[in-house]
Amino acid sequence: MTDSTREPSIFSRIIAREIPATIVYETETLLAFEDIAPQAPVHVLVVPKTERYANVVELSAGDPALLAEMVAAASRIAAERADGEFRLIFNTGGSAGQTVFHVHAHVLAGSPLEEGTLAH
Ligand code: AMP
C-alpha cells in the first residue's frame, strides 16, 4: 500500500523519466522496459504506473483488471519481440527473489528459454 513518506521505487523513477530505461511499451496505466540484467533474449519488465501494490497478490486482490492488462501487455510484447510464447514471472517476497517491492512482471521470451531462469 502507498506510504507517502516512502521514497519512490526505482520503477516509479523510471516511470517519471528520472532515470533512463529502454522503454518498449506504454499505456495510461503501465510501462514496460528492458530489464537491466537480462536473463533471456527478451527480458522485459511490465510495471503498473501506480506504486500502490507491492506484489501480485496485493494487485490481484486490489485491481484484477490491472493484472489482466499486465498479462495482455506481456502477450503483445512477446508477439512483437519473439514468437509470441513467453514465461511470465512475478517474484513475490524476498525469499522468492523479489528485490523491488513495486509489483512487476518479468516477461521472458526468445527460444530456447532455459529451465530455472530467474530462480535466483
Ligand atoms: P525482482 O528481483 O523480481 O524484484 O526484479 C527486479 C528486476 O529489476 C531485476 O531483474 C533487475 O535486474 C531489474 N532492475 C533493477 N534496476 C533496474 C533498472 N534501473 N532498469 C531496468 N531494470 C532494473
Image (cartoon, rainbow, N blue to C red):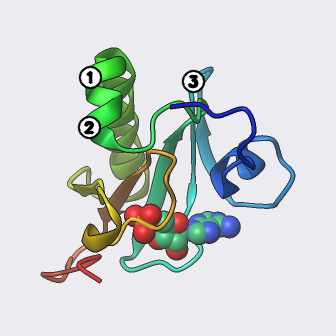
Are the residues at dot 2 and dot 1 in contact (C-beta closer than 8 Å)?
Answer: yes
Pointer 3: what residue? 29
SS for callout 2: helix
Residue occupying the far left of the picture: 115
In depth, the one of 4 and 78 nearer the eye is 4
Residue beneath the point at 47% across and 67% down: 99
Horizontal side of 60 relative to 77 (left or right) equals left
Residue beneath the point at 44% across and 43% down: 54
Residue beneath the point at 40% across and 35% down: 73
Comparing labels 3 and 2, the label whose residue is closer to the camera: 2
Pointer 1: what residue? 61
Image x and y of residue 36, in percent: 59, 74
Are the residues at dot 3 and dot 1 in contact (C-beta closer than 8 Å)?
Answer: no
Image x and y of residue 6, in percent: 71, 45
Pointer 2: what residue? 57
Q: Amino acid type of disc 2?
A: Val
